[in-house]
Image (spheres, coloured by chain):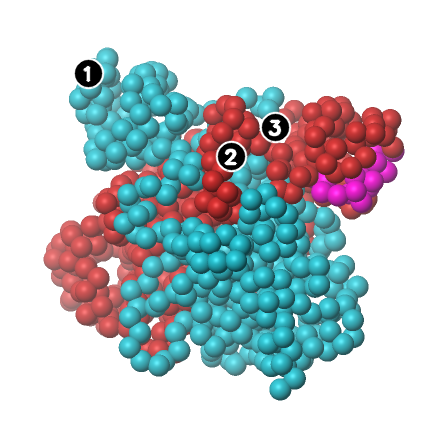
Amino acid sequence: MVEDQTPEALDGIKIVELTRDPAGEFVGKLLAGFHADVLKVELPEGSPGRHVGPFVGREEDVDRSLNFWYYNTNKRSAVLEYRTAEGRKLLEDLLDSTDVLISGIVPQELSDLGLDLQALEAEFPRLIILSMTPYGLTGPWKDWASSDLVALALGSPLNSCGYDDHSIPPIRPGGGQSYHTAASFGLLGVLLALLERQTSGRGQLIDVGMHDCLAVSSELANLFWFYPGVEVQRQTCRAAQPTPTQPCLFRCADDRWVYLATFAAEQKGWVTLLEWLESKDLAVDLSDPKWQEASYRQENFYHVYEILTVFLQLQTAEEAYHEGQARGVAIGPLNSPEDLFNDEHLIARGLFVPVEDDQVAGSVIYPRLPYKFSDIELAPLSRPPRLGEHTEALIRSIKS
Amino acid sequence: MTDVETKFGVPNADTDDRSVRPRVGPLAGVRVADFCWMGVGSVATRTLGDFGAETIKIENREVIDRTRRLPIYKNSPARNFGQELLDADPNKGGMFNNYCRNKLSVTINMRTDAGRGLAEKLIAKCGVVTENYAPGVMERWGLTEERIREISPSIVYARMSGYGHSGPHSGYRSYGPNVQAVSGLSQISGLPGREPSGWGFSYMDNQAAYHCTAAILLAIYNRNITGRGTVIDMSAFEVGINLIGPLMLDVSVNNRPARRPDFPTGNRLENPNAAPHGVYPALGQDKWIAISVFNDAQWQGLGKALDQPTWMADERLATQAGRFANQDFIDENLSAWSKIRDRHETASLLQSFEVPAGAVQSAKDLDEVDPQTAFRRVNFELDHPVIGPARFEGNPMLFSRSKPDNWRSGPLLGEDNDYVFKEVLGLDEDELGRLQRDGAI
């Protein structure tokens, strides 16, 4: 708990956001949660994300986009027509007292606007500029167009995702994860630059390309290529590996799925699993001592899978989850987002919080940010700004 | 240092000199007692080491880190993850090398009193402690949160686990794929009407780690201002739920469940109504290209790229809404066109008409074909005494000033015992010898 008046976390840090997609917006949301003052500077038509659904009650409106809401909690919004000379002057005046600029403007648009991030870096020595674009500011693809799907494809995560049946194309993992991956690196970039500035007093330009971020975030795929020099193959809902492995998805009695990976080589895990099967009289022939040999299990693992399939069909996903975990088995149900609100563990940890928005939707349930500190209080989530809600205050503050 | 430029433009470190040197970067001067292990833990402290923190991994010779054991070896036949060699050389593992470059390694047996005493001495010299053991392990060694804060009052103590350190399921076991399952990320990924395709890698190992690193950086920044440390309780499950994104609000605000017959939507996109939006076959076995069209301008660009085929003139396809409603028709025709064409050439062609498109690239493609990653030189190479020269995944934040300090490849098991125990902790030969005899080191 805070006992004195020392500034907390990023209190006092002023951030201006000129973002175009969720990658930069997510960084702004997280920094706002750390107490930074994040001002979203929007063109009169509103940020692109305001025009993307889903919308509250399916009613399309710049202030009803849940896509916008999700990525823009705890921010303010000012409309500034920075394509004109007058607006541009206001923007530059604003940057004079800004600590961090988050720009999502791609190279072509920067040049159309006559904006030069390196020139800004020189003009405002304390300013940290985070550029978050699909491919970065340089390179042969800097002007290529992107999307979540295209980014996941080019960056290679998509190559690892899909089904065992390779007549089906690779399938995009859902939720906008290309943007979320880039956002993680953007966040680290800003925090590192802020730390560096504490010593040097200087800002700098951080050029984050979503493509680069994805290219280093595929886990085993790069490593299998860097070391043994092999490519991985996608497999249904489990790690892509050089050759096919045993399935890890099981359908339970209530038609829900559970994920259970069993590592044949691990003795302790095997004993635990076997005890669970035996407790329900469903171990069949796995109680035979020959199954205690790791090498025998590695060679005959398909049989274990067959037995587990029957075993898990006889219980609900929740039963299998809690009993398995009580025994030390790393099993998890494939929850759907709506399953999470009633999860006793998440309730105990206070993950879901109401955010008041009287005018549009009343009380809205969001997940709070995923950080818990003993000695830093994060900003409570507050509703995203309506388009231009803080324009007048901004103009007043610049002019004074 | 040699002056040979590698493919990635970074000079190889001289293998002969692996001794610890002062580090540069935003985290220079920060020392970390790193109890992290496995993929998620190793990634969480990777960025700290890369940017100048003296990151000391505390390892145990009897319980070797899984990333050291996984069979990802150079010049060896490929083995799957589950087929690890039971007597693997802990210094040969590629996964460990990639994740633990720029870190130090000491071996301490935490099951001995002397070992625990040594660890406490080390913590007293550190500003950050990290761990991702199952909840209860640190406590079993006497390292409660209170004890750690007593040893080092302004410590940043980052704890990371699947479910976090409080709540009724805090003891539940999980790996990355479990976290993807329970947080909802797997269920929302796949074709409608069949089992989820989920994730083909431990996405949440990366993401939970990146967010843990962010929390550590924030805590150090805060300490620099306030003088106060903090305990950080990171739950990968909670990070995963934050990554569901706007869909979470569609469920909570619009009461629209995500488990329903027409969801998930495979490669199609509901918001906005993009069409075509899919992954299409390309020339070659199991080769694919992703194409996404969001508006009339991109649709017209696609028309020019395909040389205005008659099927695209179908009046049902005149509007974005019409195209969204007729995706089966579009996909069939587009697939017939794409499947006889090279995916990289198709991507370049479509991009020349400003249509978002890209080949589904593999790690090999990134390395051998992709001109963008080559140009941006994100990856780098370092030599390693057992493995030899190897490539590393770099940091994709390209700073104008704060370059990563890629100082040394992954440490050999216990490689830095002498430096840490003698120079950092100030032990003399006699004390070291005694600790070795007692089985503490």
Q: Nearer the viewer, residue A95 or A130?
A: A95
Q: Are marks 1 and 3 in contact (CB under 8 Å)?
A: no
Residue that label 1 marks: A281
Packing grade of label 3 (10 A; few <14, some 14-19, many >=20) is: many
Q: Residue at x 60, y 56 (%)?
A: A63
**Distance from the alpha carbon under mark 1 to that under mark 3:** 41 Å
Q: Nearer the viewer, residue A146 or A352?
A: A352
Please provide percent x and percent y for residue A365.
Answer: 43, 50
In the rendered image, which quarter is residue B335 located in?
top right
Residue that label 2 marks: B189
Q: Nearer the viewer, residue A103 or A85?
A: A85
Q: Residue at x 50, y 23 (%)?
A: B194
Circle 3 SS class: loop
Q: Which mark is residue A169?
A: 3
In the rendered image, residue B300 lying in the magenta stretch gets the answer: yes
- Labels 2, 3: front one: 2
Circle 1 SS class: loop
Left or right of A185: which side holds B324?
right
Q: Are discs 1 and 3 both within one chain? A: yes
Please provide percent x and percent y for residue A232.
Answer: 52, 33
Q: Chain of mark 2?
A: B
Left or right of B138: which side holds B75?
right
Q: Chain of mark 1?
A: A
Q: Which residues are magenta?
A: B291-307
**Comes first in the chain, label 1 or label 3:** 3
Left or right of B429: which side holds B232?
right
